[in-house]
Amino acid sequence: MAHYTISYARKVLHLVSLHELPELDLDHELLLVERPNEHFTRAKILNFFETYNSITLAGEDAGELFEEFALEFRRVTAAGGVVTTPRGEALMIFRNGRWDLPKGRLEPDEPLRRCAAREIEEEAGVAPGRLVRPLCDTWHIYNIYGAWELKHTFWYHFERSDAAAPAPQLEEGITRCEWCPVEEARRRAEESFPTLRAVMRAL
């Protein structure tokens, strides 16, 4: 079943195939159906986002819808992770006024899980420990210095034996790093970005 969920700040766009729409339990405020003579461009979707927080765009094929939409963006691949301890603590960072998880862009020829581990160490100052498992992958769009990007982030779960003292990477806008109970991390995620909610639910 093809179904793409793309976040924009705290808003969500679902791209689905028309024949699968009845099977999907999607929470949306607006349903758009793409026809051969009507294409929903980035500009149109962003205009709808001024009024609605959650939109579903349905067409003949979700994969084709996604590829059409993605053409209007520069694609970026990234990786990040959740670090926990056996005591049920999770590591979070506070970046640009919101709770977040460490993540960053993939370097050339870098394995995804190595990118996730590197970003955790760089942004939170903590070695991630052992890899437990992959969690999920997320998509989100944003405008950086006038250029629109579509970021595909792969998320991993790591576990440390202890809650080592973290150190925020200040030059990346990270002002705090802290360990908190996993349930508290989930609560913070619910108040933050849709991508974060997806990651914590996968955990």
Image (cartoon, grey):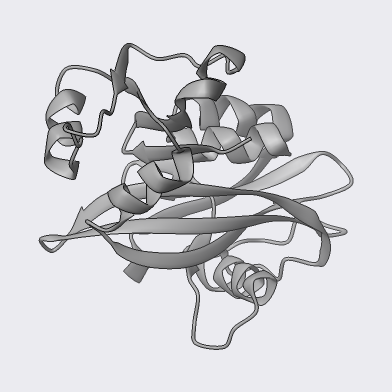
Position of the N terminus by quadrant: top right
Image coords of residue 151 (percent x, y): 40, 58
* Residue situated in front as seen by the camera: 142 or 132: 142
* Total count of labels: 0
Q: What residue is at 47 percent from the left and 46 percent from the top? A: 63
Q: What residue is at 50 percent from the left and 87 percent from the top? A: 108
The quarter holding residue 109 reads: bottom right
Image coords of residue 137 (percent x, y): 59, 50
Image coords of residue 125 (percent x, y): 58, 69
Q: What residue is at 58 percent from the left and 60 percent from the top? A: 80
Position of the C terminus by quadrant: top right
The quarter holding residue 52 reads: top left
* Residue situated in front as seen by the camera: 176 or 33: 33
The answer to whether one can see residue 169 in this image is: no
The quarter holding residue 126 reads: bottom right
* Residue situated in front as seen by the camera: 70 or 60: 60
Judged left or right of residue 148, residue 107 is right
Which residue ends up furthest to the bottom in the rendered image?
Answer: 109
* Residue situated in front as seen by the camera: 17 or 86: 17
Image coords of residue 178 (percent x, y): 59, 48
Judged left or right of residue 64, residue 82 is right
Judged left or right of residue 162, residue 48 is left
Q: What residue is at 13 percent from the left and 64 percent from the top? A: 145
From what the image shows, is residue 58 above or below residue 40? above
The answer to whether one can see residue 10 in this image is: yes
Which residue ends up furthest to the front in the rendered image?
Answer: 36
